[in-house]
Image: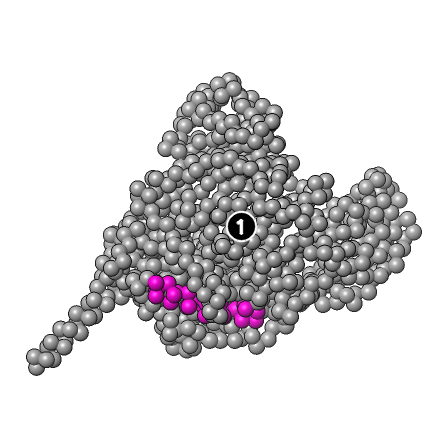
Amino acid sequence: MRNRIFKGLMLSYLVFMATGGAKAQGSLEDYRRAYALYDRFNATQVYNDPTDIRWEGNRAFHYSAYTADGLNYYIGTVPEDAQGTADIKVVDLEALASLLSRETGKEVKRNQLRLTAFKVDPEHPSSISFEFDGLLWRVGQACSQHPSVEQKEERPHEGVRSKPRHWMEVDDEKGEPPVVSPDGKRKAYIKNDNVYVCDSDGSHERALSNDGTSGNYYSSWIRWSPDSKRVCTNKIRPAQKRYVYYVESSPRTQLQPILHQQEYAKPGDELRFKIPCVFNVETGQAIMPSTDLFDRQYDLIGPDWNVDGTKVTFEYNERGHKVYRMLELDAETGQVRTLVEESSPTFVNYHRTYRHVLKDGKRMIWMSERDNWTHLYMIDLDKGKVKFQITKGNWVVRNVLKVDEDKQTIYFTASGVNPKEDPYQVHYYKIGLDGKDMVCLTPEDGNHTAVFNHDYTMLIDHYSKVDAAPVTKICWVEGDVPKSSLLAQADLGRIQDAGWVAPEIFTAPGRDGTTPMWGIIQRPTNFDPAKKYPIIEYIYAGPGDAYTPKSFMPYNWTTTALAELGFIVVQLDAMGTSYRGKKFEDVCYKNLKDAGFPDRIRWIEAAAEKYPYMDTTRVGLFGASAGGQEAMAAVLFHPEFYKAAYSCCGCHDNRMDKIWWNEQWMGYPVDSSYVACSNVENAYRLTRPLMLVVGEVDDNVDPSSTMQVANALIKAGKDFEFVVLPGVAHTMGERFGEHKRFDFFVRKLMGKEPPSWDEIDQK
């Protein structure tokens, strides 16, 4: 008996030792502290960190930054004859507030003054303009003189509709106004679904086509040739549109619910078909080309005239995204030829294309992943072949900023050039059009955001890392080793005094044992290495981008508050995401349920091996949208590792979600891979705690996708939690959902009952 009692006491002691650290976590005090962190760590508490940096001309610039006195506005000028320190002046907000109080008859306080649409006169940098109280103000001479004031001018943007088109709506290309020819003598327009021209005064109307119908009409996006002799447009065979419907149960404007209808094409739906057409307005000749080179359309972009008006170019995105072509149509013969073709056995990432036709009309800069890395190529348009590769190496071009043909220079951003750095960090570069003399304009270790002046002779560079304070410099672009001058060094003293803890950048090999995965580890401000911490991963693994923060942020809405409850929160980019080469990204193809989990699990295990306080027996994860799909997939396909999931607004079956996202990564036609990746089809696998959340008026992912996975779980007899947010669109759950997420993980990973909501100040 004594041995039994002793063994029982020992067992209790071991259980206490294993879970005792968690008993001090998830408390009322932790919740209150978590909700208070935003006020303690927001951007207003970081001093001397320039934002909204803008150049006015080539020598004047301005920005704003917080100080102990509040938000300040700064005006800078760079000397004409030297690469020295800029002259910086501070707008006198006390004087400006007094001036505005006097002029408006209202009390205006300095710390409440926000200067929207702030601008500096590049010729007279001491003169500024801004919007305030519905008026446009111009003030000079240190804000002491009487300002000039005018009514803010409201101009409707040309071509903008009174009701903005929803991003899922396809423009039918109808109803555009007549297009005037370059010589001003004629107008071209659509009438009765056909192409018409008339003289500029409306006389001498005549039809250039007569075969247009409502079921096969001509686009009103008409383009004239540079010599005003021809017009081109598309003939469009429309497809029946799909709509999704959802009920807004609790509208603000009325008592009764509102039924919403939204255009929403889904994978496998029929799509419209376009044929570029050319009409000679002098002879009436009509050119309708063969469609052999563009007969399986997902989309067709263009047509656009070349510089001499003899040919038009257009771009063909093949359904399934395995082929992408730039094509040229001869306006005389109707012959179509390929200028550039991209092809892949998986997918061409057409969102990452760039093209720039040089002034001679014979060469084009083109972006491609054809050597596995995103690079720039010079295309010979006469031969339709690659002339040479402009950029090369095991790194990726991110964006082309400017092609300066006068200087024979390309300005661009790239990541991964320096093998000793985080491969996702963005730097700015210039290179010759001939592919020679590449220079890094922002060499410091960090993630860079730069703003160039108008002639690209200078830039203001703002860079940081998640664990390093922002630095801002003025850099001179010319030369092989660009010079720079410090503009500002951010002061983190206030948030550090308040307990701010920087995330840790952590790397570990992925599934192949060699390729490093990069991520961050967020600890609570009261971190104690003697405790055991459950782990929560924030996941978004959509293959179109990379998602782990690389720049400094005082408060990370996905990790900061959640960690404060007593968790270690992690985030990383695994295989299947972008900017690490085509092969790295291709892991996701027809396999979105992979979501990089083999890499994520190895990464978390490596972190826990280094830090034993990370408890890999209690790992949860959460995400929204694609991250919502992936969070649920984790507990369906990897329940041995992931023990709880919060899934919000997930596209749980890729057949239910938007066409462009899902056919890009899952392919066309819709096949068994869609079924294999479906959380609905695999709902029967659930063995771990799951919370589903959805906004009832989600206009991004069809809310029925969440309803259908809930239905499948019910039919499979599975226990889960379900939260529907009235009147909420695409979301992570807003403040209500965030609190539900907090409580869910405290219950499921800490084994504790969370404190009452009434006891917590959630401001």
Please identify the quarter of the rendering in which residue 119 is found.
Answer: top right
Where is residue 465 drawn, in percent x and y?
Answer: 45, 48
Q: For this view, does 372 lie left or right of residue 547?
A: right
Disc 1 crowd, CA 10 A, few/some/many (<14, 14-19, 20+): many
Q: Which residue is drawn at 72% across and 56% down?
A: 388
Position above or below: 412 against 535: above
Q: Choose between 763 and 188: the one closer to the eye.
A: 763
Q: Residue at x 69, y 56 (%)?
A: 389
Residue 478 on the magenta span: no
Where is residue 385 drawn, in percent x and y?
Answer: 76, 59
Residue 594 on the magenta span: yes
Where is residue 204 drawn, in percent x and y?
Answer: 89, 44
Quadrant in which the N terminus appears: bottom left
Note whether residue 72 is visible: yes
Q: Residue at x 47, y 31 (%)?
A: 73
Mark 1 residue type: Val
Q: Choose between 314 and 383: the one closer to the eye.
A: 383
Q: Which residue lies furthest to the top in this view?
A: 145
Position above or below: 246 against 252: below
Q: For this view, does 20 lie left or right of residue 438?
A: left
Q: What stretch is highlighted in magenta?
A: 587-610
